[in-house]
Every structure is written in C-alpha cells, then in structure tokens.
Amino acid sequence: MRLLVVYHTMYGHTLQLAQAVAEGARQVAGIEVEVRRVQEFDAVNQIIDNNDAARQVREQQQDIPVCTVDDLKAADGVVFGSPTRYGNMTAQMKQLFDSTASLWLNGDMEGKPAGVFTSTASTHGGQETTLLTMMVPLLHLGMLVVGVPYSVEGMIHTEARGGTPYGASTIAGGQGELQPKPEDLAIARALGQRVAEVTTKVRG
C-alpha cells in the first residue's frame, strides 16, 4: 500500500508536521510512505529570494519531489498539509486540487482514505476552518476523510497548542518563530498511523 504525504510550506512548520505524519504512517506494516511538496508559485519564489529564513526552508526541500497528478492517482491514501491563509488552505494547495479534474472525472480517488493537517500563526488563526475547507475537495473526489479521535493522548487540553479532531495542527507564531510542540508532533504521528491503518483495511 502506498501512502502519500503532500504538503505546502514557506517557513517549515507544515513540513515538520508532514515528517511526523510520515513517521507515524511508517509504523504500519505493509505501508510505503512517500512525501511530496506542492509546487511553489513563481511570484512567491521571487519573494522567498529576498527572505533569508524562507530561502533556507526552500533549500532544505530541494530533494523532495513536487507532487503530480500521477502521484495522487497512484496512491492508496493521501494526507494533505497546508498553512492557513485567512482561514483557508494556501492558493498553492488549492491549485493542486484544481488540477485533479481528470481524477475526478474517472473516479480515480474514490474510496481512498485521506487526512489533513495545518499550521497557523495564532491560537485562533483558522486551524479548524482550514482543515474543514481542505476536506471539501476531498469529498468531491470521493475520498474517505479520516480525523483524529479524542482517544489519542493529548487531544483534550487547554494549552496554546494544536490538535483538533479534524486533523493535526500547530501554532507557528506571527513571524514563524515558534516550533511545533512535542504534543503537536505526536498527534501528527497518530494521524499518519490512523490514515495508514484505514488504508490497509480499505485498500488491502
């Protein structure tokens, strides 16, 4: 079974969650995990060229292949991750979804398990709305959305950190200065493991 972890990031927070999701998925026997990044826009790359922190993050990802429609078609399950933009996924991630018309027409994604994760600048910066709106195209594609149950350790808390039943999340800070807390990464690993387990049951 092939599980694909697809993410977009500028400052590295969703990449860290993606790596944790992949780590969790690899705990499931029979699952082969591949990580892919979303293609960056040329206009944004020009901005990154003048931002030392963002440029370093971009350089760290050069060995991670860009996700293609064929990657999505070949996968048995997919976990998508995007930072929030005004309570929604980034335009770069939306562009990937918008490129899947052929998969939708042929029903290529139907019945495949899927999960989502995100990072936001602040505690109430759109974690839940971003995750929920990311689910909409997945449902149109016929995918089976998998969340994070409250039986996962660390889900019930009152701290300023991530973790929602809709998917894994973390708080990046207004300038991207924060790092995902250990509990956030643990929930991301739990999400990856859960999607992988569902994938083996549904697609095996």
Image: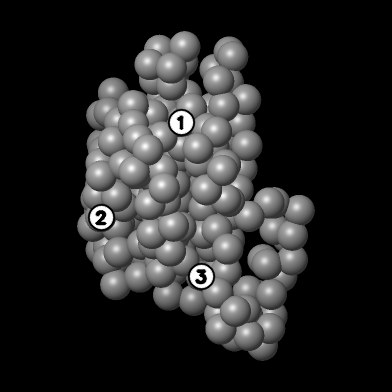
Residue denoted by label 1: 77
Between 29 and 74, the residue placed more toward the observer is: 74
Q: Picture coordinates of residue 124 (x, y %)?
A: 25, 63
Tell me whether the residue at label 3 lies in contact with that at label 2, contact meaning CB atoms closer than 8 angstroms: no
How far apart marks 1 and 3 lie (CA) works out to 30 Å
| Mark before the other along the chain sequence, 1 or 3 | 1
Residue drawn at (57%, 69%), measured in percent from left and top? Answer: 40
| Mark before the other along the chain sequence, 3 or 2 | 2
Residue denoted by label 2: 133
Residue drawn at (53%, 62%), measured in percent from left and top? Answer: 9
Mark 3, Cα crowd under 10 Å, few <14 / some 14-19 / many 20+, is some
Residue drawn at (41%, 25%), measured in percent from left and top? Answer: 194
Can residue 18 be seen from the camera position used here?
no
Query: Of the residues shown, which amino acid type is indicated by label 1?
Result: Gly
Q: Which corner quadrant of the image does residue 171 belong to? A: bottom left
Residue denoted by label 3: 176
Query: Of the residues shown, which amino acid type is indicated by label 2?
Result: Thr
Mark 2, Cα crowd under 10 Å, few <14 / some 14-19 / many 20+, is few
Q: Which corner quadrant of the image does residue 203 belong to? A: top left
Q: Nearer the viewer, mark 3 or mark 2?
A: 2
Secondary structure category for the residue under label 1 = strand
Query: Of the residues shown, which amino acid type is indicated by label 3?
Result: Gly
